[in-house]
Amino acid sequence: MEIEERQIEEMVRKYSNMLYKICIVILCNEQDVQDAIQETFCRLMEKRPVFEGEEHEKAWLIRVATNICKDMLRFKMRHPKISIESIGSIKAVDSTETIDSIDVIGSTQAADPIERLSAYLVAPRYRETLTELFKLPLKLRTVIYLHYVEEYQIKEISDILGITQHAVKKRLQRGREQLRILYKEE
């Protein structure tokens, strides 16, 4: 039992950053990302799957995390929320700072999750590309991220997402086309 707990702790340390990057690309909300990562590791502890190797371990975690993110998005679409501030019935106590604008360390940053992710995870030369990536539809964004950032091959992405290799190729093609269009507009 202790060995398994140590292995799980090691996996949390090893894969948390990667899962954060993947989930933020899908969800664009830090609180939801933290919930998704926590749920991913809870399922790991609950299921305790036997892995064939490190790549199988990583692929399982990515698959579970992306499925959790999709479930969260599906729930939000079925249960839309209206913020109280948008109704105008309650004003913020301090309009210069919101919960979303406070960094984990305590410094203030932009409330936009894309800008926070760019500032936190990406070298300055890649920030514009990441911003454009967030403009893509979820299906294209996920495949492009896994292929170009996490450097997965088409077959691996197909296995992780549970889609055909042809679908992965087509999504990569469409994503690249849309990115080209976005760059030409600017």
Image: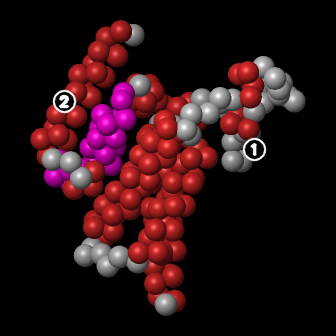
Q: Is residue 22 left or right of residue 32?
A: left
Kind of residue indicated by mark 2: Gln
Position of 88 with respect to 82 (left or right) is right
Q: Which image quarter: residue 63?
A: bottom left
| Horizontal relation, residue 51 to residue 114: left or right | left
Classify 10 Å Cα crowding around label 1: few (below 14), some (14-19), many (20 and above): few
Label 1 amino acid? Gly
Q: Residue at the far top: name it.
A: 185
On screen, 150 above or below 183? below
How many numbered discs, if any?
Answer: 2
In the picture as drawn, the residue positioned furthest to the front comes out as 78
Magenta part of the chain: 136-158
Q: Secondary structure at mark 1?
A: loop
Q: Which x, y percent locates residue 87?
A: 73, 21
- Residue 102: x and y, percent? 72, 39
Residue 173's label in the rendered image is 2
Q: Is residue 163 magenta?
A: no
Residue 155 or 46: which is nearer the viewer?
A: 46
For residue 76, which numbered disc appears in the image? none
Q: Distance from label 1 to label 2 (Cα)?
A: 40 Å
Residue sitting at 37 percent across and 35 percent down?
Answer: 138
Label 2: state its secondary structure.
helix
Give the x, y percent position of residue 127.
46, 30
Q: Residue furthest left?
A: 166
Taking depth in this image into account, of 127 and 144 the one nearest to the observer is 144
Q: Are marks 1 and 2 in contact (CB under 8 Å)?
A: no
Which circle, 1 or 2, is nearer the viewer? 2
How many residues crowd around disc 2 within 10 Å: few (fewer than 14), some, or many (20 or more)? some
Image quadrant occupied by the C terminus: top left
The disc placed on residue 106 is 1
**Residue drawn at point x = 45 percent, y = 42 percent:** 74
Tell me if residue 117 comes above or below residue 154 in the rendering.
above
